[in-house]
Image (tube, helix red, strand yellow):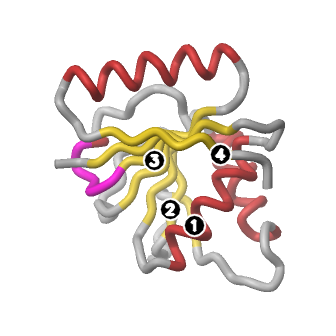
Amino acid sequence: MTRVDFYQIESDEEPMLFACRLIDKVYRKGHQIYIHVQNEQDCTALDDLLWTFRPERFIPHCRSTSETDAPIKIGCLTEPEDHQDVLINIAGQVPDFFSRFERVAEIVPRSEISRDQARTNFRFYKERGYPLKYHQMAAQ
């Protein structure tokens, strides 16, 4: 059964920057990652940010629409075809395909609107019996 972790950002850190830290950590542990974002603008922003996030490290990634094979893919409109390990959700809404992943990481930004959506998502997973963990993330 899919394990769901909520990462509540307790600082003014931008959610995309926090996502990059989480992506880097999860990737270094040997996992494949699909990052689900809200729209094409977010795809572009995260793609660009991952190239510059840690200049001393390479984080191999591409968009889900790319023909390139990479352990990290970013998408918003389509269900990933080949990634089933870790889903990092920055889109807000729970994607329909979440249950095909071993683990889901829900990023919860500091804004009240984002927190309300996270509460809705938490209830959604809880009502369906998914194992949940909640992490409060301090400033880095």
Q: Element type at marker 1?
A: strand
Question: Is 80 or 30 nearer to us in this picture?
Answer: 30
Is there a contact, CB below 8 Å, between mark 3 and mark 4?
no
Q: Is residue 63 magenta?
A: no
Occupied quadrant, residue 7: top right
Disc 4 from disc 2: Cα separation: 24 Å
**Alpha-carbon neighbours of circle 3 within 10 Å: few (<14), some, or many (≥20)?**
many
Question: Is 40 or 6 nearer to us in this picture?
Answer: 6
Question: Is 76 or 115 nearer to us in this picture?
Answer: 115
Is there a contact, CB below 8 Å, between mark 4 and mark 1?
no
Question: Which label is found at residue 137?
Answer: 4
Q: Mark 2 points at which residue?
A: 73
**Alpha-carbon neighbours of circle 4 within 10 Å: few (<14), some, or many (≥20)?**
some
The answer to whether residue 37 is seen in the rendering is no
Q: Residue at x 65, y 45 (%)?
A: 137
Disc 2 from disc 1: Cα separation: 5 Å
Residue 139's x, y, as percent? 79, 48
Question: Is 96 or 9 nearer to us in this picture?
Answer: 9
Q: Name the residue under label 1.
A: 62
